[in-house]
Amino acid sequence: MEGLLSSIKDILGDTAKPTPIQALTLKNLFHRTTRDEQLGQYRISTTTNPGIWRQYLLASETGSGKSIAYLLPMLQYLKQTELDQEQKRNPKPPLPSHLLHPRGLVLAPTHELSRQLSKFAKSLLHNIKLRVLCTSQANAGSSTGRSGRKETARKLKEDLSALIYGTDGAITNADDGEFEIRPRKSRRSADIVVGTPMKALEMVRGWGWDKVEERNMPENSSQFGGRQFYAGKPEMGLSEVEYVVIDEADVLFDKDFREATRLLLSDISAARGHPLPPSTTTAPQHTNYPFHLILTSATIPWSLANHLDTHHPNLTRLVSPNLHRLPQTLRTEHVGWTGGNRDADVVKRIKRVWAEDALRGPDAHGRRQKSKILVFCNKSTRVDALSAYLKEHGVDNVALSGTSGERRHGSNHHLDGFLNSSRERIPAASPGSTQIVLSSGEKKRVEEPHVLITTSLLSRGLDFAPSVRHVFVVDSPRNMIDFLHRAGRSGRAGNQGKVVVFGKLRGRGSSVAKDVRRKVGALVM
Ligand SMILES: Nc1ncnc2c1ncn2[C@@H]1O[C@H](COP(=O)(O)OP(=O)(O)OP(=O)(O)O)[C@@H](O)[C@H]1O
């Protein structure tokens, strides 16, 4: 579709070529007639015959462009079906107007990833208009406390109501790029909803749907003043959903997410008039969903492979040749602890990276170079301790783990400067700095933090900026799947990157680091 192609060119430049996984998707998900070829066009099958809904797995290494590989067919399909429907001049019966009725769903494991994906989808839609809503604001988790939750829920409610009922032409949430101008008269729903499965279920079944039974049990009711507990009102209907993408499928089908993901798929099927038969057997049994389904992942652990063999035996697997390998542009270095203070070793290494940057001199635009560094720890407590130590020693940083307060705000602003975003360009004259106004009125530029410390929370799917040239793995990775995702936040899309793996390389206790070194070696292409 012309409009989509020109958006891709705007984002990637005129000379970009499809990556291997994108080439596979173009070949398998799009159909080209001779006339299409002459016109240089791709089309996607728009059949709505429930017998031929398709299921695909897109699997390729980190940073290889899977988001475009699945967004393009989905967006083109949704636009094409919309145009076909308009041509038929055969309006569908009206749907309940107080609910959102998306036609596409994109599911992701974290709200940070949901936000980045919705923003990216939006940037592909400048020329073909479809509406994208990210529902992740209120999914900050119970650990955030009641007031944070109320605030984010209130904001989402406002956004939803603006989206459903219109805002008299106002621009809603324009800073986040999530919504667009929508005159009150149009009253159209979101075409695509992006969020976590839990948040999507909450919107479909009403807030607290999963607590009703437990809260109303006689032994628990006194704890809540004996009052009957009811779930909130649903905000989303699923009967129109024709396209579902499950990003980071290995996470969304792991033990923490599996139930919610499967429940949602089953709710969509039921809402579309094809309730799934109860799954009574572990023998391979193809689940015929009444919608197109794309699963994507950079890793296929045995649990996902097992799930796919059992529930999706007919799924078409599109796999890049470099799956389960580190990107070619990512170098690996193993660094030994000195035997003293490990936090001091990390500070030393960070300063060494920046000293090497300084030696390289300015970049092609005459700007001072200073790499951004992403540090992975295994636990939140370690993130906080290392962050405090680094600050004490003059290394400003952002620390983010599952329990961090910053996650409550329902945006990715806490990650500004680290994430890749076509809209978040750093001004050329002042790389990596922000202007602040002092109480005296004087304006001053302060340097943004160049170090982000986190856990595996941010290792999944997030597209970090090319300026994130170093990933530090300071705690032994729990497994190589985890390592591939952490390391893969750098060296993306052909950019150079380096992963520095810390460990005890000599003496007693060095066997763990030696084992990690051997396994990491096997991931190098
Ligand atoms: N054909 C292309 N040419 C150049 N850059 C591309 C191309 N396709 C995508 N990119 C860029 O590559 C980067 C990584 O893409 P994306 O985030 O989709 O990777 P991914 O495969 O989903 O990674 P992960 O497994 O870590 O989620 C993005 O910045 C994207 O804009």
Image (spheres, rainbow, N blue to C red):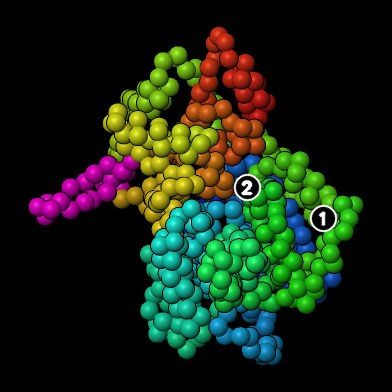
Of residue 124 and residue 61, the one placed in the foreground of this image is 61
Query: N-terminal of the two: label 2 or label 1?
Result: 2
Q: Which residues are magenta?
A: 428-449
**Magenta span has 440?**
yes
Quadrant the N terminus occupies: bottom right
Q: Which residue is drawn at the image coordinates 79% and 51% (left, top)?
A: 308
**Which percent across, then down, holds residue 91?**
66, 90
Judged left or right of residue 315, residue 83 is left
Q: Which residue is drawn at the image coordinates 45% and 55% (left, top)?
A: 144
- Mark 2 → mark 1, Cα distance in angstroms: 29 Å
- Secondary structure of the residue carrying tag 1 is helix
**Magenta span has 494?**
no
Of residue 267 and residue 250, the one placed in the foreground of this image is 267
Residue labelled with disc 1: 311
**Which percent across, then down, holds residue 76?**
63, 68
- Residue 433 visible, this angle: yes
- Residue 42 visible, this angle: no
Residue labelled with disc 2: 19
